[in-house]
Image: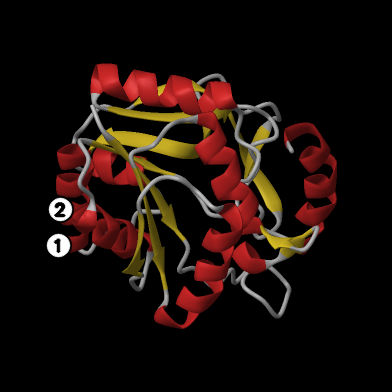
């Protein structure tokens, strides 16, 4: 079985208070997306890499790829308005049986999480990694608590999210055609009625969202690189 690694990197990072896209924010003179790709290609032998991005960023990413000096084929695909559009565009260019989609700003996923998510997807057709919710969850309205939500069955979705290619392609096609906004690939499968399996991720597999997250990045980098 062959598998493509898909990195949607066309986002603008609206919640990241900086003058640069968060995937291009540098850690030790290398952008976040560099460390993300390096981590993933170390964790698994993917058959190809497909990066979804804006045309204006191609030159920047090409410099990143030259620094990485990876030994698998890679291509760039035009990003879309939303993440789902970008991933769908990437899937259209994939030559593999399966696709692993990973956030460009999650540079600290463990080998185990990557490998177990892929292996589970090979068995079931669709799998994601994530973590059980630890904290008590409150529903609020107007800054007041309305209720406490039981956390026993709550799960924080991480990436990679791995699917048989035709499954995720058709699921995203359906959600896009129906104008349903999905925030991850598993949501598209849920909307299409497809069962998605879960495996445990690792605590350090955070998605860099706020500028304050960079303090954690400095700590985690010492463990993974």
The answer to whether any part of residue 56 appears in the image is yes
From the viewer's side, name the closer residue of 190 and 104: 104
Tags 1 and 2 in contact by the CB under 8 Å rule? Answer: yes
Q: Is residue 64 above or below residue 104?
A: below
Residue 155 percent location from the top left of the image: 52, 29
From the viewer's side, name the closer residue of 70 and 102: 70
Q: In which image quadrant can residue 181 be found? A: bottom left
Apparent side of residue 39 relative to residue 117 in the rendered image (left or right)? right
- Name which residue lies at 29% across and 58% down: 90
Decide: few, some or many residues near mark 2? Use Cα within 10 Å; few <14, some 14-19, many ≥20: some
Decide: few, some or many residues near mark 1? Use Cα within 10 Å; few <14, some 14-19, many ≥20: few
Q: Which residue is mark 1?
A: 177
Apparent side of residue 115 relative to residue 217 in the rendered image (left or right)? left
Residue 80 percent location from the top left of the image: 33, 71
Inter-mark Cα distance, 1 to 2: 5 Å
Q: Quadrant of the C terminus?
A: top right
Q: In which image quadrant can residue 67 be found? A: bottom right
Q: Which residue is mark 2?
A: 174
Disc 1 element: helix
Disc 2 element: helix
From the viewer's side, name the closer residue of 106 and 146: 106
From the viewer's side, name the closer residue of 57 and 217: 57
Residue 160 percent location from the top left of the image: 46, 38
Apparent side of residue 129 relative to residue 210 in the rendered image (left or right)? left
């Amino acid at each position: 079985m062959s598998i493509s690694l898909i990195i949607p990197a066309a986002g603008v990072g609206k919640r990241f208070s900086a003058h640069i896209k968060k995937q291009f924010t540098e850690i030790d003179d290398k952008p976040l997306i560099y460390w993300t790709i390096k981590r993933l290609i170390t964790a698994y032998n993917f058959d190809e890499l497909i990066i979804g991005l804006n045309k204006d960023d191609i030159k920047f990413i090409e410099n990143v790829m030259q620094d990485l000096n990876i030994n698998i084929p890679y291509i760039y695909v035009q990003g879309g308005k939303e993440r789902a559009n970008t991933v769908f565009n990437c899937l259209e260019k994939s030559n593999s049986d399966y696709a692993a989609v990973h956030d460009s700003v999650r540079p600290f996923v463990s080998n185990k999480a990557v490998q177990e998510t892929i292996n589970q997807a090979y068995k079931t057709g669709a799998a994601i990694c994530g973590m059980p919710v630890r904290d008590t969850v409150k529903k609020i309205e107007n800054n007041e608590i309305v209720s406490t939500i039981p956390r026993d069955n709550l799960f924080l979705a991480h990436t990679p999210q791995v699917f048989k290619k035709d499954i995720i392609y058709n699921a995203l096609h359906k959600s896009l055609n129906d104008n349903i906004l999905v925030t991850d690939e598993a949501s598209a499968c849920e909307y299409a009625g497809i069962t998605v399996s879960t495996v445990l991720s690792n605590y350090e597999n955070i998605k860099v969202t706020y500028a304050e997250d960079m303090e954690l990045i400095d700590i985690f980098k010492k463990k993974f690189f």
